[in-house]
Image (cartoon, rainbow, N blue to C red):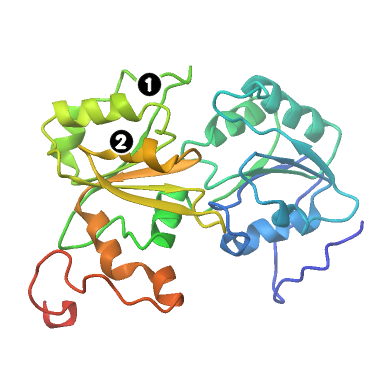
Amino acid sequence: MTESTLTLPTGNWPEIKPGWVWLCGAGPGDPGLMTMHAVNALRQADVIVYDALVAPEILEWARDDAEKIYAGKRGGKPSAKQIDISLTLVELAQQGKRVMRLKGGDPFVFGRGGEEAQTLIQHGINVRIVPGISAGIGGLAYAGIPVTHRDVNQAVTFVTGHDQTGEATKTLDWDALSRASGVLVIYMGMKHAPSIRAGLLGAGREMDEPVAIVSQATTPNQKVLETTLGAMLDDIANTEMGPPAIICVGRSVLMRQVLDWQALERGEKPRNLDPLGRGKPAELRD
């Protein structure tokens, strides 16, 4: 077995046993956001079945002789069927291979990881789940947007922008979501932004509600659009923002004015040290 030159700290790292499948999260894009358990899996796997949003640099950490199978699913583009992906994992494991299923973000957050794990276990295949940083948290953090801030919200809700068919989901209760959560984080919502906007406005959210759209989060191509619920469709069209993207709705978006740490790295000053208008430094509040 030829190992990757990428090394881990000395420790009792778990072993992928022959015939096992590890479902691993690759994080939102930046290879540095991979967990050590996922890197450990890359060093051992005989075969890696990977998604479209996995950074190419990550695959370079695999063993030189590891087989790499692309199984990406992208909205509106030819994609492998989910059942075929799941059964491929079963077949590879039944061949006695050490299998790594590498998925963007976290495998259990809108990633179909639960479906794949269920299929594997139903076929008698042992699995291990390796969580990853989800784009709805890590991607927004790279944009300088905290999904929770005690001056803004006591709850955050994660929502998918489409259903199993790829169409706008009809099961979401926008009224209930709007009442229950000050901050909404919407995955895979760009295609259906008009219906999402209509649902939120119809539920009583204000036209001037802050919205941020983060495209290709945590990658060198990351783009961030700060807008409002009222202006978001025109602004999306004018900036040509596209998927993959996360949409964040709520006042926590305002915190980017002070927490845009990538702008600080470029030598820029914060636009507003007190974007919520609290009137005193955070460290002086209980």
Amino acid beneath label 2? Asp
In the rendered view of the protein, which quadrant contains the N terminus? bottom right
Where is residue 140, by image quadrant?
A: bottom left
Q: Which residue is mark 2?
A: 234
Mark 2 vs 1, N-terminal side: 1
Q: Dot 1 surroundings within 10 Å: few (below 14), some, or many (20 or more)?
A: some
In the rendered view of the protein, which quadrant contains the C terminus? bottom left
Residue 150 is left or right of residue 102, and the answer is left
Residue sitting at 60 percent across and 34 percent down?
A: 117
Residue 273: horizontal and vertical position, in percent?
A: 21, 74
Q: Is residue 254 above or below residue 164?
A: below
Q: Is residue 85 above or below residue 105?
A: above
* Tag 1 secondary structure: loop
Q: Which residue is mark 1?
A: 168
Residue 187 is left or right of residue 104, and the answer is left
Where is residue 74, by image quadrant?
A: top right
Residue sitting at 85 percent across and 38 percent down?
A: 96
Residue 228 is left or right of residue 188, and the answer is left
